[in-house]
Each structure stands twice: as structure tokens, then as C-alpha cells.
Amino acid sequence: MSLPVVFIPEYIDKAGKDLLTARYRCIAPWFGGAARLDAPREDAMRSHLYEADAVIVRVFTISADDMRRAENLKVVVKHGVGFDNIDVAAVTARGIPVAYTPTGNTNAVAEHAMALMLSLMRRIVPAGEALRAGRFADRNDFQGEELEGKTLGIVGVGRIGSLVARKAAFGFGMNVIAFDPYVSPERYDGPAVLTDFETVMKTADIVTFHVPLTRKTRRMVDARTLAFVRPSCRIVNTSRGGVIAQEALTEALHDGRIAGAALDVFEEEPIPPDHPLCRLPNVVLTPHIGGLTQTAMRRTALLAAQAVIDALEGRTPEYIVNQP
């Protein structure tokens, strides 16, 4: 009897790989190479999906057409939390579970959000550039601001957002307000004061986003929204790039209508190096690395591997996107 085939098109930590290769035949072109998300090309690997019993994806896409051709597939696993690269409806129509790993990188993303806030407020990037250019004497030009006493607005207080709230309130002495239509004030026990979205955007010194990309959240920050934020406001996004209309944000930053932005995610990834956002001095950009710590990658890989094992051995994975 032949072993089930597991297709892993993108890098996962060795711990997860070893757990799977001990049980199944794994197809992963990166096994002998570097941990690059873009090598080899996605379309060149797609044929492997059509012979697989299970697949683990990060940014690799799963379309309705793929589901028509992947006749052996029994489970789709997302290495991470955002599943907008998977056509969940098409997978569900086949009666196949879509598993994900919501606890794998929670702390990593929360810490990265705090790091982006600190970088914006203390002007870390331009100060470092000045130092490398030999302009040590310019240090007085980089007076920043402190987080303590500032109002942090959090959009989405799920696992990551609620952890950011605790780190900000108890670690940095910030006043925290939040918006989340799916969290009941009676059941919420965190440090944030729950309010409406418009109040968060109008009131906060910093607004950080921790929501999935859905029909309701897509471009929830647009020109209309940005028209009523305070000029001193900074925006941080470590959730999904589609939550913010990039062209509207770029214009607001360029015109000085908001003080700054720190983005780990973008509407188009990778963001083109000649994009106007890349040239603005009041912007901090990172290449979707919020969840990329060694600890988080190992934890997430093990969770993803276990989801595959559970599904192929007839058990229900712990976290299912399309749970009946």
C-alpha cells in the first residue's frame, strides 16, 4: 500500500517536516534549499497539488479550479491564520476540511505590532539611517514620543488583539480602546474599553489592526475613514493588507493628514519597491514578518503537521475554518 502524499510548497520548520516525513511521502521542493517563500515558482509546483492527499500552504493559493483537479485531496491546512489565499467555499463543497493554526504565532505578531509602534514613535528608522550616513550630530532632530499615556485603538480583540491590549496597557501604560463587533462587552474581560469603530479612529493616537480579511473588513480604512482621524494619529497593520486602501493611506501620509504608518502587510505582496509608500519618511515597512520568529515557526509547523496527521488518520483537526 502506497503512503499518502503530503504537498508542502513553502518552507516550514524542520520539526513539522520531520513529523510528516516519518509517516508520509512528502513533496516539498525547498527541502534541500533555503527558506524562501518565492522559490521555486508557484505555478511550476502546482501539478504536485493534484496528486496530494494533503497540502500545507502559507501564501500558496488554492483555487476552485485546483479543487476540481485535486481528486485525492483530503485536507487543506493553512500554516498561519489568514486564509484569504484559499477558496474555502470550493474546498467545503468537496466536503474537505480547511484546518489552520491560530495559536502558532499569536505572541510573535503581538510583539511585532508593539515593535512597529515603538519604531514609529521613537523614529528608529530615520535615526538609524542618519547614524549610518555619519550624521550623529543630527540626533536632536529625531526626538520621538513615548507610548505611556497615549491612547491605543485596537480593531479586533481576538487572540492577537487582546494580547496587544494587555502588552500595551500593562507593559507600556497606554490607555486602550477597542472595536470588535463580535465581542460582547459582558463577556470581554481585557483592559480595553470597547467602543465603536468611528470613535476608535477619531480618538486614538495609534490604531492597530488585528482582523481577518472579509467582505466587511476589506478596505475598512479608506479615504472617508482617514478624513476623520487626528493629524497626530499613527496607523499600524499586521493583519491583512486588504484591510487598508493603500492609495488613500499614501495620500493621507503624503499630505500630512496623519502622522505615520507602520505596515507589515500590503494589498499587493510583495509591495513594488517603487511604490510611493516606500519613499515616505513617516512610514515603517516590514515584509510580512510579524509571525516569523523561530519559536512561532516551530510551533506553527508542528500544529500544521498535526492537523494533517489527524485528518489522514480519520480524526478532526483541532482548528477548522469550515467547521459545520
Image: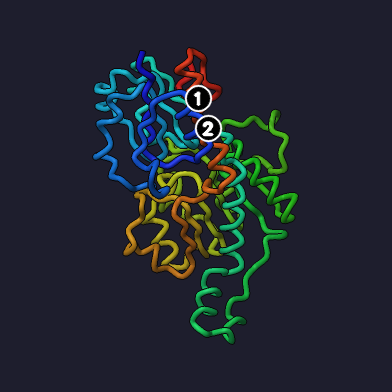
Q: Earlier in the sequence, mark 1 or mark 2?
A: 2
Give the crowd class for mark 2: few <14, some 14-19, many >=20 residues within 10 Å: many
Q: Check disc 1: other Cα within 10 Å, few if <14, some if 14-19, many if 20+.
A: many
Q: How many marks?
A: 2
| Nearest the eye: 100 or 167 | 100
Q: Nearer the viewer, residue 82 or 99?
A: 99
Q: Nearer the viewer, residue 42 or 113?
A: 42
Toward the bottom, the furthest residue is 137
The residue shown at (51%, 78%) is 132
Q: Residue 284, percent across and down?
A: 49, 62
Residue at image x 65%, y 42%? 163
- Secondary structure state at the residue bearing disc 1: helix
Judging by the rendered image, the residue that carries numbered circle 1 is 307
SS for dot 2: loop
Q: CA distance from mark 1 to mark 2?
A: 9 Å
Is 168 positioned to the left or the right of 66 in the image?
right
Residue at (36, 13) in percent of width and height: 1
On the image, numbered disc 2 is attached to which residue? Answer: 101
- Residue 112: percent from left, percent from top: 57, 52
The quadrant holding residue 247 is bottom left
What amino acid is labelled 1 in the image? Ala
Residue 291 pos. (x, y %): 53, 46
- Residue 125 appears left or right of 268: right
Amino acid type, residue under disc 2 in the picture: Thr
The answer to which of 297 and 24 lies nearer the viewer is 24
